[in-house]
Amino acid sequence: MRVLKNDFSRYSEQDLEEEEEETGWKLIYGDVFRLPPALPVFCAYIGTGAQLFSLIVFLLLLAVMNLFYPGNRGAMYTAAIVLYALTAGTAGFVSAHLYCRLTGPESRWATTLVLSATLFPVPLFLMFVFLNTVAIAYNSQAALPFGSIVVILFIWILVTLPLNIIGGILGRNFAKGKDFDAPCRTKKIPRQIPPVVWYRQGPCQVFMAGFLPFSAIYIELHYIFASVWGHKLYTLYGILLIAFIMLIIVTSFITVALTYFQLAIEDHRWWWRSLFCGGSTGFFIYTYCFFYYFGRSGMFGFLQTSFFFGYMLLASYAAFIMLGTVGFASSLVFVRRIYRAIKCDEVRLNVSGLAVCPEWDRSWVCMMITDAVAKMPAWCTPHWTSARPPSIKC
């Protein structure tokens, strides 16, 4: 906050003084809201993360209200499946709404809707098929019966998919007549990004972004692993809810800070970077799996190894999507707020600088300026100075 306050003071002084060269994050105001590459995939990840976030919140609230018996872990698994199906409309709504706000309601938003319905369920289904096949080959009781598999498929086809489509249609309808409302207009030609040292590049930022949030949940993560894989009872759901709130807060703040550092070095590619910075905690969670498996658990053999690392890979992937969505949402609010607080779209009508564009007619431009000044409202006062090109400030 102190750094931002100093930036605002410096930029305000530059507006009052003579024309100076802009530096830092204000310099890239014409590129900071440029749409990211692979926009349908990006919006689908944000929608899926919103669905997983709502799923975790509802699951924790039910656990805090003591609706789950600690000795019956199957009840929580069943509740997670049902809640995932019922919150599918969130993924469709958020992904379609965001995509249509960025590109318009007449764009190809159906692609984003299909991706939001498959980004998480398809890897989950493929991993489940593989692990269930391994369990059947070992004659293990962990193999899910064929009837249960059919029920889960019917839930996805009859509940999850329709709710996702309905949510997407509602998101598109709510986006009609509403644009993204970016504080700054995007320039046609993207600005060249200056080179930076290695420790300020993307991989290092992503690594630093995941360390602090992971340290906030490290202790509770050990008890969760012991409960799920060590057959121990876990009843401190209130503490788990507090740890989850701390995780969200720390992820938001660290992602916002790294986004600011990225914009300060004149790098406007913050969309995907904020997603990866927020979701990098998922990489640390999966790295912790190796420490827990070889140092704390007594599991061995291909069956137990495949089950542990297979399902934990899905859990880490879900954490990556959910926390990445939190990081992007926090960064979006932050970026919009700081660029609204500065005057980055001052209209300057330059006559003396027409030499750089010889194809322009000087008399025609002067006529346009005179006509614009004559039609200005009373609350718009022209300021003409001889030290710099004429400007109109409202």
Image (spheres, rainbow, N blue to C red):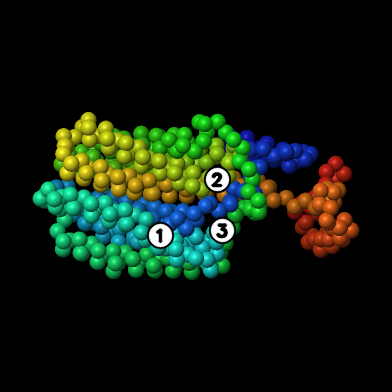
Q: Position of residue 299 (x, y in %)?
A: 16, 37
| Gap between marks 2 and 1 measured at Cα | 23 Å
Helix, strand or loop status at disc 3? loop
**Which residue has dot 3 on it?**
180
Q: Residue at x 53, y 45 (%)?
A: 270
Which amino acid lies under the numbered mark 3 shown in the image of this protein? Phe
Helix, strand or loop status at disc 1? helix
Q: In the displayed structure, does residue 332 sit left or right of residue 245?
A: right
Q: Residue at x 21, y 56 (%)?
A: 78
Q: Report if residue 62 is visible in the image.
A: no
Q: Residue at x 85, y 49 (%)?
A: 355
Which amino acid lies under the numbered mark 2 shown in the image of this protein? Arg
Closest to the observer: 54 or 34? Answer: 34
Whether tag 3 and tag 1 are in contact, CB under 8 A, the answer is no
Figure disc tally:
3
Closest to the observer: 196 or 218? Answer: 196
Q: Position of residue 110 (x, y in %)?
A: 45, 66
Residue 269 is labelled as: 2
Q: In the displayed structure, does residue 56 sit left or right of residue 191?
A: left
Q: Examine the rendered structure and indicate whether residue 379 appears above or below residue 218.
A: below
Q: Report if residue 49 is visible in the image.
A: yes
Residue 115 is labelled as: 1
Q: Examine the rendered structure and indicate whether residue 292 appears above or below residue 238.
A: above
The first of marks 3 and 2 along the sequence is: 3
Classify mark 1: residues with Cα within 10 Å, few (<14), some (14-19) or many (20+). many
| Quarter assignment of residue 151 | bottom left
